[in-house]
Amino acid sequence: MSTFAAVVLFIGVTAYAVLGGADYGAGFWDLTAGGARRGRNSRHLIDQTLAPVWEANHVWLIFCLVMLWTGFPSAFAAIMTTLYIPLGLAALGIVVRGSGFAFRKVVVKTDQQRATGAAFATSSVITPFFLGTVAGGIASGRVPADGHGDPVTSWVNPTSLLGGVLAVGVCAFVAAVFLTAEARTRADARLEVWFRRRAQASAVATGAVALAGIAILHADAGRLFDGLTGRGLPLVLVSAACGLASLALLHRAVPRLLQALAVGAAGTVVAGWGVAQYPYLLGTHLRIGEAAAPDATLASLTLVAAAALLLVVPAMALLFVLHQRGRLDTT
Amino acid sequence: MPGLSLVTVGASLVPADPAQLLPAREQMAFTLGFHIILVPFGVAFTFLMLIANARGIRRKDETALLLARRWSQVAAVLFAVGAVSGTVLSFELGLLWPRLMGTYGAAFGIPFAIEGLFFFLEAIFVAIYVFGWQRMRPWPHFWTGVPVVLSGIGGTLSVVAANAWMNQPGGFTMRDGKIVEVRPLEVIFNGAFGFEAIHMLLAAYMVAGFVVAGVYAAGMLRGRRDRYHRLGLAIPLTVAALVTPLQIVVGDIAAREVYRNEPAKFAAIEAVPTTGTHVPEVLGGYYANGKVHGGIKIPSGASLLSGYSPSTRIQGLDAIPAEVRPPDRLVAIVHLSFDVMVGIGTALLGLSAWYALAWWRRRDLPRSRWFLRATAISGVLAVVALEAGWVVTEVGRQPWTVVGHLLTRDAVTTSGNLWLFFAATVALYVAVGATTVYVLRLLRRRWRDQGGATETDVPYGPSRSSQSAPAGGQG
């Protein structure tokens, strides 16, 4: 029962990492798109692509928080009392990101668009970085079971920094692939090239970070390293294969396949973390079963998960399909 | 050393409040107080929008459609700000109150898990509705808005279930400081759930109704008395006027429920220092040093209202054990907030009656400028009443976080300097709040310049272009 709840929780984490991550990554490209004139077209595509979906994607984060504090309350408290600095900063980053994006859609003057856009884009880079450091802190076992771990070294450490940089890189990569596909759907050749170059660059950069990460994890988080090279290895390999395939097919493949490959690359690496960590929720000291809420609570969460499968997943599919078919007017 | 051990025992019995308690409470109050203003716009404003939408389609009423479309744009901005400020609250539950979540999350969390589902559906269908104006057919588009309203209701009921549980906790068994058994249905349908949930839901409809009506009343006062403004006033005010009397009844029931099941809160609401009968109802006044200073006393009023008889016995603050008795300062806040809420509610009932009477007799808005003035400020008043009501529930619960189980000072985190976090949050929220207002005013100015019926981006453009009129330019 508790394992099932943990799996549901991790599906939520993966969904947020991929879908929410793509939205953050789009903010990364927004930030680096250059001046108002030069970056206009790419920002316009980012705006149109994100507008109808980012809030729905964002709800996955709420889903994860709720699943964690209800299903595994003590682990939630332990994480919150240890990693409160990056989590607090991420929470504020989320406010800036969402409101900045919503405001930019309304304002028309260039300087106002620049200010709100900068707020949106900067926080789109900072927020996943902090969330990545949180993941690194948890994965490397720096959150004690009773909480109140070191407020600084729990997230300022090699694995956390790797997590932060990797999060930003993966988000940027997934977003670039998505936006390449989107530009192709709209038959906008110039934007397609623009985003394809960035997809390639971010793939190479993220791949390099991931390779360097092997050495970092080996030195800093032995148990995670063992898990990722042992039980989690197939998923890590699938992730690498998806990343390489999407890179190779970036010129040719149909948009949907490209998006699937990018989702695969990002999703499997997060899933790999989950598999590597099993059966522990925190490091090697708090087992899933030990942290779990009573059975009736877990049963309630199972019902909620089933309802999500029946209601939310089809609704979200409807949103994505309408968006892809251009039924939503985002101008 | 008996003296020393006595001191240590004394110290452990009444520990000093953690340094984090004050900033944590201030921050929670501030961020929740900010978020709660946005709630009615996600929950109830969308309902007003659908009324205008349905009327527009059914009666081929261009003005109503224009209102619906513009309202959806406002709702989109407010929903975004509400979504992210709500997320901060989720973080804060852990960052500020880890011992609430760590110990009680297994029970307290269940309503939130359900709320998550509704939030998902709301976010999805808000997007489909807001961006579906141009390229969907009218009725299918309308129906994509219905889940928004329904999930708004469901979400409100879920969140309030969690809040109600803190006031009347139930559905769990504790052993050695840990929850070992949970009865989810008892958690959700706790003693305070029914009246709190309905009270909040109706409050959301009142706030959205009066605020939106107030905006158009202000426009009419400035001479813009076209049909656009009249309809923009009539739709929300009709909803608010229908809801307000219901709310008065529900509020009355809620007060009696609190009298019966939350005597400590009731004693603070009525500012009753000592248990007794023939307790007067004190309107206004400031509670300090064990008595109310000033205010208007209605003899036996509180006793009559709570038990229909002057001899109804009301438990006073003196019945609460001294170590968990709320300080006078908090009692004063709860008492005044309650009076503000009830006072405004009564005034809004009067406004509703005025509107209903004019409509009943002449099928028109009241002609007096005073009616427009009253409507224009009714929105602000409704927001104040909402905040006041929330203060009654939350401050009236102190010193408890989970009544009878967990004191607020034991729920708070013990790590970090929260003043820094609080300062950063206030600075950010002030900026976000100011920009929200700025952006809404920008929309208003843009729409005013565009004018009413001559708007180019009429909804459902493509479907209409196939009939006769050209669809016009892009929005």
Image (spheres, rainbow, N blue to C red):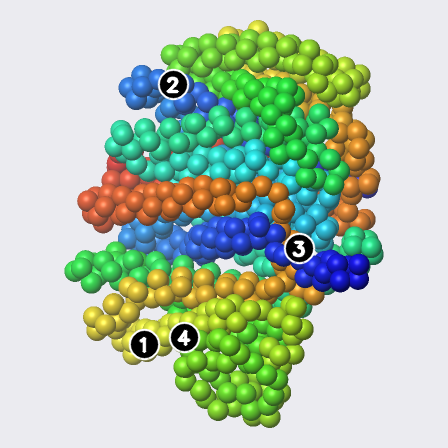
Do the CB atoms of the residues marked 4 and 2 lie less than 8 Å apart? no
Do discs 4 and 2 belong to a common subunit?
no
Q: Which residue is mark 3?
A: B410
Which element is circle 1 on? helix
Residue type at the position of mark 2: Ala
Residue type at the position of mark 3: Asp
Residue B38 visible within the image: yes
Which element is circle 3 on? helix
Task: Name the subunit of mark 2.
Answer: A
Residue type at the position of mark 4: Gly
Do the CB atoms of the residues marked 3 and 1 lie less than 8 Å apart? no
Give the label on residue A248, or none.
none
Residue A321, above or below B341: above
Q: CA distance from mark 2 to mark 3?
A: 49 Å
Residue type at the position of mark 1: Trp
Q: Quadrant of residue B237?
A: bottom left
Which element is circle 4 on? helix
Number of disc labels: 4
* Nearest to N terminus: mark 3 or mark 4: 4
Eye-nearest disc, 3 or 4: 3
Do the CB atoms of the residues marked 2 and 3 lie less than 8 Å apart? no
Give the label on residue B354, or none.
1
